[in-house]
Image (tube, rainbow, N blue to C red):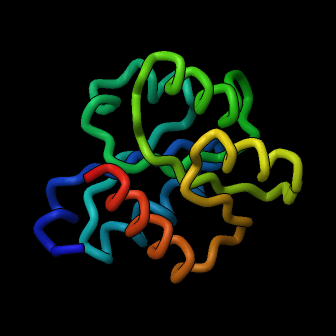
Amino acid sequence: MKKAEHLISLISIVDDDESVREATMGFLKSNGFRAQVFASAEEFLGSTHLNETKCLILDVQMPGMSGLELQRRLAAENHRIPIVFITAHRDPEIRNEVLCAGAIDFLSKPVREEALLHAITLAFECAA
């Protein structure tokens, strides 16, 4: 991926844990990415960033709409945003479900930086 793509392609982070949001955004920005954070799926859906998001880093379990529900809603509304799920709950059934529904990856918290960068690279290739 070219450095210029980092600067113009938006990565949206949706996680109810503020420390995860801020740490992930800081990591992405330090690696040259443009990132925006959201505390809930509903906040993301109501934002002006929905249509410009080229990769979505999404928590599985959140109050209100879950990450799985957001994935289903985006698909139903024909939004083709590559999704990288992150979770503290390693559930093989959920992992299988989200991957079969088109997610790029399903990473466990704490997320290894190399794994996240690899998943983002794949997401941008899918979005191209």
Q: Which residue is located at x 60 percent, y 60 percent?
A: 105
Q: Which residue is located at x 67 percent, y 64 percent?
A: 107
Q: Is residue 111 left or right of residue 43?
A: right
Measured from the top left, where is residue 58 in percent x and y? Answer: 58, 46
Q: Is residue 103 left or right of residue 122?
A: right
Q: Quadrant of the N terminus?
A: bottom left
- Outermost residue on the front side: it is 100
Q: Nearer the viewer, residue 103 or 63?
A: 103
Q: How many marks?
A: 0
Q: Quadrant of residue 32?
A: bottom left
Q: Which residue is located at x 32 percent, y 75 percent?
A: 30
Is 37 situated above or below 87?
Answer: above
Q: Which residue is located at x 57 percent, y 21 percent?
A: 73
Is 110 situated above or below 34?
Answer: below
Q: Quadrant of residue 50?
A: top left
Q: Quadrant of residue 61?
A: top right
Q: Is residue 58 left or right of residue 94?
A: left
Measured from the top left, where is residue 48 in percent x and y? Answer: 27, 25
Measured from the top left, where is residue 108 in percent x and y? Answer: 73, 66
Is 85 situated above or below 32?
Answer: above
Q: Is residue 19 left or right of residue 27?
A: right
- Outermost residue on the left side: it is 4
Q: Nearer the viewer, residue 13 or 92?
A: 92
- Outermost residue on the bottom side: it is 114
